[in-house]
Image: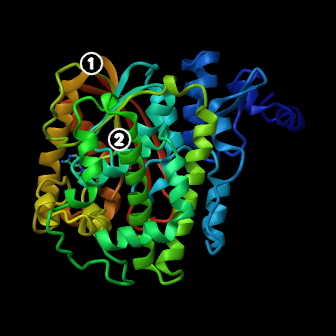
Amino acid sequence: MKGSNVAEALAQEMSAKLFPVDRQLLPNLSDVYELELAFYENLILDDAGLLRNGAYFTSVDGKPTRHFLMCTGNPVKLPDHSSSRLKSFFVKNIFRTGYGTHGLFPYRGKFHPQMIKGIINVMGLKPGETVLDPMMGSGTVAVEAALMGINSIGIDASPFCRFMAQTKVDALTMSLTRAKRALGNYEEVFEYFKGRIGKPIAGSKVRSRNVPDGYMAVMESAAEYVTAKDRGQLPKKDRDTSNTYNFLLLAYLDSAGYSERSKRQAPLAQFKAILERYVFVAEKIQAVLKGVESELGKAQILEGDARGLTMDADSVDGIVFSPPYSFAVDYLANDSFHLNFLGVDADELRTRMVGLRGRNLSDKFELYKEDMDKVLSECGRVLRKGRICTIVVGTNSNQLSKVLGVSPEDVPGLQRILVDMANGHRFKLVKEMSRPITGMSNTMRLEYILMLERQ
Ligand SMILES: C[S@@+](CC[C@H](N)C(=O)[O-])C[C@H]1O[C@@H](n2cnc3c(N)ncnc32)[C@H](O)[C@@H]1O
């Protein structure tokens, strides 16, 4: 056939070569890594697994997948004044992000939830098993695993991340009665948080606030709830109170962040629009999950240090995480607004944050490697033999080239450095995929998905 009949070649369907005809791919896959993950999902999952947990398929044998159902239906309601760019982002990414409770807080460096779902499948994780994210950020893995019926342990050094991740997980199942009532009374709720936390002032992002009792003064319900020995044992009334409080507080902090960054809308109107979106998003996913709540995985959300994990050796069935990209993104500066709001001592926190320790670039790089070596050693200790640890990491060749004194083209790449390091901790690379990062092309061009098997 080669070189002969073009029409005959074009008459063939590529997807029919890769997938059985009764497994229908989602319409808007646009990157090669998405096709790769779909390819492995198809090899690894049976029909029931694909219907329940597949990330890249519309239907199996004419039945819609749960992912398809979660993402379609009414579109996410955005405030009227949202830019057309934001609106088109949600349309374009309908199957990638913005479903479930993933969209509850815009966290910089957040995973694509759909990609995490695909990765969890390709790692061979099954409902009832446990996945760990030792640097969970906004809790994408915890939310996604819960939706997939997989138990998770999520850890982050930042108390704000713990609060945010816990709230997003709880919003999957919490009673929304009081949150909806609060929306009807949004002025009063806004006044309450304004009195309790403070009022957003445009442009005052970096000021440091003096909250006398520390962050627990505003997150006390969250703190009590999260540290209760057995959260399931709390009376339902108390769980509802604490869940509603956290949900409203996250919406307030989210809206306050917007108000301080932009004067486009008055803080009160901003709060109302964001709370409306939160309630809408939570109602939407809860409607899809109706009747299957008991199938959700359990999430344990903790504040901790990935360099010294508290869990036993050989105790988790998979690990997925995205470490800070060396020193490319200062997560504390990004979160300074909320951390300040919550009265967290950012200087103290900085001493425990991977990628932020050190005075200058080369110092930071040395400490980054030292810290990541500890993180990988811990991952090797807690992961069961034969299971997979997936690291998602971007390249930051420009910064590395300055430190190493070579041109950006000759930089080995952070992914190579981490794979070499992982080799020293009982890991072997079994799959590497890459995806382009749009919008940041001068600092990072590619993000790598590194799948390492524990030997
Ligand atoms: C790239 S972000 C993770 C984003 C996450 N994948 C998500 O979907 O939101 C890296 C995270 O590592 C956390 N981190 C930094 N040092 C840490 C440490 N020593 N222990 C645990 N987490 C840490 C940061 O707070 C940040 O949230």
Most foreground residue, 304 or 227: 227
Kind of residue sitting beneath label 2: Asp
In which quadrant of the rendered image does the N terminus lie? Answer: top right
Label 1 sits on residue: 384
The front one of 116 and 296 is 296
Q: Secondary structure at mark 1?
A: strand
Q: Toward the viewer: 420 or 50? A: 50
Distance from Cα at disc 1 to Cα at disc 2: 37 Å
Res 393 seen here: no
Q: Is residue 251 above or below residue 222?
A: below
Residue at 23 percent across and 36 percent down: it is: 228
User: What percent of the width, then of the height, locates residue 179?
Assistant: 50, 53
Determine whether the beta carbon of the residue marked 1 sits less than 8 angstroms from the nearest atom of ligand 1: no
Q: Which residue is mark 2?
A: 238
Q: Give the mark nearest the N terminus, 1 or 2.
A: 2
- Residue located at (45% from left, 59% from top): 106
Question: Is residue 24 shown left or right of residue 240?
Answer: right
Q: Amino acid at mark 1?
A: Arg
Q: Position of residue 414 (x, y in %)?
A: 29, 49
